């Protein structure tokens, strides 16, 4: 199945962490990001920096193919070639 837009869903085991989100339901990643960005702004103000959509907590599908070279870092905290779930 080809999905045009990037989508994400909250993994059910993390539903407790994100009470404001429906677990297990595919949503536009941009819509989820808007909700999580507002939440993250509060955390960052408290010096609790974290990624907006943590790949341990969300699944992703669709969207354009990856265009960065293999091993490229998208954040300065990324480890090149590292496991994105850690």
Image (tube, grey):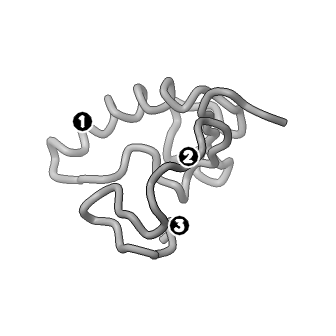
Residue 82 placed where, x, y %?
45, 75
Residue wearing tag 1: 41
Task: Tell which of 5 and 22 is nearer to you.
Answer: 5
Checking the image for residue 68, the label placed there is: none
66 is higher (above) or lower (below) than 72: above
Mark in the foreground, 1 or 3? 3
Label 2 SS: loop
Residue wearing tag 2: 16
Label 1 with label 3: CB-CB less than 8 Å: no
Q: Which numbered disc flags the more N-terminal residue, 2 or 3?
A: 2
30 is higher (above) or lower (below) than 42: above
74 is higher (above) or lower (below) than 27: below
How far apart are the two marked residues, 1 and 3, measured between alpha carbons?
Answer: 22 Å
Q: Quadrant of residue 7?
A: top right
Q: Residues within 10 Å of mark 3 (few under 14, many from 20)?
A: few
Residue 6 placed where, x, y %?
59, 33
Mark in the foreground, 2 or 1? 1
Q: Which numbered disc flags the more N-terminal residue, 2 or 1?
A: 2
Task: Tell which of 2 and 20 is nearer to you.
Answer: 2
Residue wearing tag 3: 85
Q: Residues within 10 Å of mark 2 (few under 14, many from 20)?
A: few
How far apart are the two marked residues, 2 and 1, measured between alpha carbons?
Answer: 19 Å
């Amino acid at each position: 199945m080809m999905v045009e837009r990037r989508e994400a869903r909250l993994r059910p085991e993390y539903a407790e962490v994100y009470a404001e989100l429906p677990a297990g339901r595919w949503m536009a990643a941009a819509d989820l990001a808007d909700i999580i960005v507002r939440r993250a702004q509060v955390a960052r103000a408290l010096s609790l920096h974290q990624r907006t959509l943590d790949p341990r907590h969300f699944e992703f599908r669709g969207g354009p193919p990856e265009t960065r070279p293999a091993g490229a870092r998208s954040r300065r905290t990324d480890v090149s070639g590292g496991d994105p779930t850690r």
